[in-house]
Image: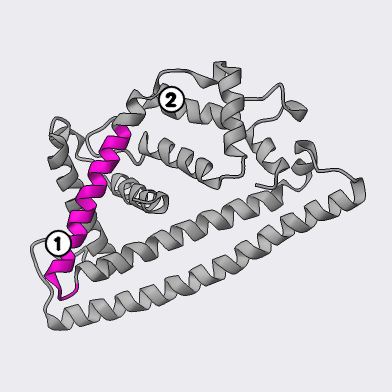
């Protein structure tokens, strides 16, 4: 499972939990395979409701041919709408990133040096625009992924439906294993806010050349909390450590700012 696929799958779990589909009491003591099966079934049911708008129908009922055609037509229309929205957001993202680049180039040309975190605060709204449009784009792409996968699953090919369920079961098992690994990791054992050397190292990783590190840290925080597997409790220390990573001041850094200031300094 790639990083983007993991991100998308965690988003599915987060939305299920927001809809009250955790089922903690019923499955808290279930073994891994049964929990993964429950999660896969819940995701498939949730995606069916999103794509085919069958919230008012009985879960055991099946649409007739006319209803299937209407649902499929509506689904295709929703796909087109989302694709158009994604294209628009990609354009907005390019514009927002270009504004940051132009500001940085103009600053270097005028001052003869790279901007510091304090300089970046003056145009913090530009960085906020980049972050906001990136978030909206990710949500739209995730929604399109949900619809396209559900279209395949509810088509006339039962083999595709079985294949999708098997994939969701497999992804659920991987998510459970990842949660358990995070639970056993130093991130759930050490308060990094009190460990300046560890904090500095993680900040360097987050603002480094590899964007996958920041992406993975985001996923780790979500898997430990809102995107955790069914029947599992929040990993409070992980949540606290990730918050400290973003908010703890860094006395050795220029201006004594936080991770946000370091990211702004590098135009990220």
Residue sitting at the far top: 194
| Image: 155 above or below 35 | below
Q: Position of residue 222 (x, y in %)?
A: 40, 39
80 vs 262, nearest the viewer = 262
- Residue 232 in which image quadrant: top left
Residue at image coords 56%, 22%? 198
Count residues near mark 1 (Cα–Cα under 10 Å), then give few for <14, some for 14-19, many for 20+: few
Residue 49 image label: none
Give the mark nearest the N terminus, 1 or 2: 1
Which residue position is annotated with label 2? 187
Magenta: main secondary structure: helix
The residue range painted magenta reads 155-179
- Taking the image as shown, residue 23 lies to the left or right of residue 115, namely left
- Residue 197 in which image quadrant: top right
- Taking the image as shown, residue 46 lies to the left or right of residue 206, namely left
Which residue position is annotated with label 1? 162
- Taking the image as shown, residue 177 lies to the left or right of residue 85, namely left
Residue at image coords 29%, 81%? 73
Assess whether residue 104 is covered by the magenta stretch: no
Q: Position of residue 99 (x, y in %)?
A: 73, 59
Q: Secondary structure at mark 2?
A: helix
Colour convention: one colour
């Amino acid at each position: 499972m790639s990083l983007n696929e993991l991100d998308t799958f965690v988003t599915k779990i987060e939305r299920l939990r927001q809809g009250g589909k955790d089922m903690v009491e019923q499955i808290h003591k279930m073994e891994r395979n049964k929990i993964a099966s429950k999660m896969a079934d819940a995701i498939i049911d949730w995606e069916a409701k999103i794509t085919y708008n069958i919230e008012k129908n009985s879960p055991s009922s099946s649409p007739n041919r006319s209803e299937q055609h209407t649902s499929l037509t509506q689904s295709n229309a929703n796909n087109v709408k989302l694709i158009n929205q994604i294209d628009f957001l990609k354009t907005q993202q390019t514009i927002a990133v270009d504004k940051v680049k132009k500001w940085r180039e103009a600053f270097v040309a005028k001052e003869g040096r790279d901007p510091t975190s304090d300089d970046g605060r003056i145009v913090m709204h530009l960085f906020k625009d980049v972050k906001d449009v990136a978030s909206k784009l990710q949500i739209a792409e995730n929604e399109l992924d949900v619809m396209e996968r559900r279209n395949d699953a509810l088509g006339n090919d039962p083999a595709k439906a079985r294949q999708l369920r098997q994939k969701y079961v497999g992804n659920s098992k991987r998510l459970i294993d990842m949660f358990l690994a995070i639970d056993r990791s130093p991130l759930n054992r050490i308060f990094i806010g009190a460990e300046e050397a560890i904090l500095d190292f993680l900040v360097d990783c987050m603002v480094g050349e590899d964007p996958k590190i920041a992406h993975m840290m985001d996923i780790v925080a979500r898997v430990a909390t809102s995107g955790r597997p069914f029947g599992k409790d929040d990993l409070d220390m992980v949540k606290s450590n990730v918050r400290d990573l973003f908010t703890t001041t860094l006395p050795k850094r220029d201006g004594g700012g936080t991770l946000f200031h370091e990211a702004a300094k590098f135009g990220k």
